[in-house]
Amino acid sequence: MAFSFGTSDFLSKEVTSKIGPYRTTVYILAISGLGALLPALFLRSSFAISTFFALVLVLIATTTFLSFASLYRAYNRGMLSLTAPIVNSFPTFSVVISLVFFGVTFSFGAIVALAVIIAGIVLVSTSLSDLRRRVSSGRQPLSPGVGSAFLASVFFGVSWATFGYATQHIGYLLPAIAVRLGGAAVGVALIPVIKPKLPQPSGGWVGTVLVMALLETLGLVIFSLGVTIAPSPSTVPILSTFGGISAAFTVSYAIVLLKERLEINHVIGVVLLIAGVVALLYLTS
């Protein structure tokens, strides 16, 4: 799951530069949504839902679109090696939501791991060499893309937690439709409202989008399968934590293939983020 999402995130850097973050979001959600329909043939599904779960499905669709739109905007504007760890700290918010709304309990060590993740976010969010110049000029001290990455992390935390919760209670199909095709529908519906910038597509991008959609579908199906066979609701934030480890793949690709270079605070922050997510996985299992 982590490999699928991490590789897809890396590939998005090139795609968003050619068709823009908004188009990338709608295309990926729509195409991966079609692929996500196939597992419904062998995974349990239910169509008898209450008003409450209908609202949960709407929440899943909305937060999923917002999370992917923020994700691709962050990756388009900033360095992958900085923005990816922030985006993939979303298990922190999944755990908080599970604690508050789903009655899941965690140890003191898990809470410490959350604090480590937050510290990592702070460290990777700013560039020390650029901070003094930005402050003196009155410019925003955050590194480019960091704000969008943080928003993506929050929205992903809500999306994955509620998606896992819904899948456990009403089966696979309807939550899968909401988290992909529903998210794409939200994006299309918002076009006349928010009037996003839609640059003219340039260069070859179709093949990369199809590969990204395939990887997104694979990651979604693996997560859903884990949730379906999970013995208790506490497994949902654990599985979402596996998704958070995808930052390790994205950062590795960025450093090796894109030659991105980090300052010492960035390096420490990335290590804390990944270590915090891994620790959270271990301590909540």
Image: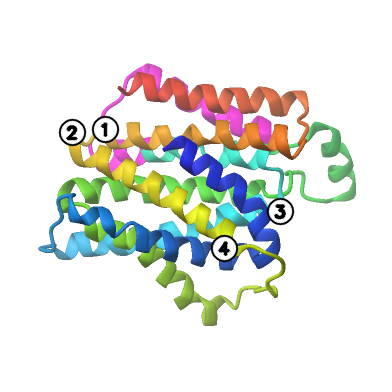
Q: Is residue 176 magenta?
A: no
Residue 190, given in percent of the width and then of the height, sits at 49, 75
Residue at mark 4 to residue at mark 3: CA–CA distance: 14 Å
Sequence-wise first label, 1 or 4: 4
Residue that appears at 74% across and 40% down: 258
Q: Position of residue 72 (x, y in %)?
A: 59, 55
Task: Name which residue type carries label 3.
Answer: Arg
How many residues crowd mark 2 within 10 Å: few (<14), some (14–19), many (20+)?
Answer: few
Determine contact: label 4, label 3, CB under 8 Å: no
Label of residue 235 in the image: 1
Instruction: Tell me whether the residue at label 1 lies in contact with that at label 2, contact meaning CB atoms closer than 8 angstroms.
Output: yes
| Picture layout, residue 251 above or below residue 280 | below
Closer to the camera in the image, 106 or 37: 37
The residue segment tinted magenta is: 95-124
- Which residue corresponds to the image point at 67% horizontal and 22% vertical from the top-left? 268
Q: Main secondary structure of the magenta part?
A: helix
* Contact, mark 1 vs mark 4 (Cβ under 8 Å): no
* Mark 1 crowd level (few <14, some 14–19, many ≥20, 10 Å Cα): many
Q: Nearer the viewer, mark 4 or mark 2?
A: 4
Tell me the tag on residue 77.
3
For the C terminus, the image quarter is top left
State which quadrant residue 256 falls in: top right
Q: Could you say which disc has been placed on residue 24 in the image?
A: 4
Element marked by disc 3: helix
Would residue 235 be found to the left or right of residue 80 on screen? left
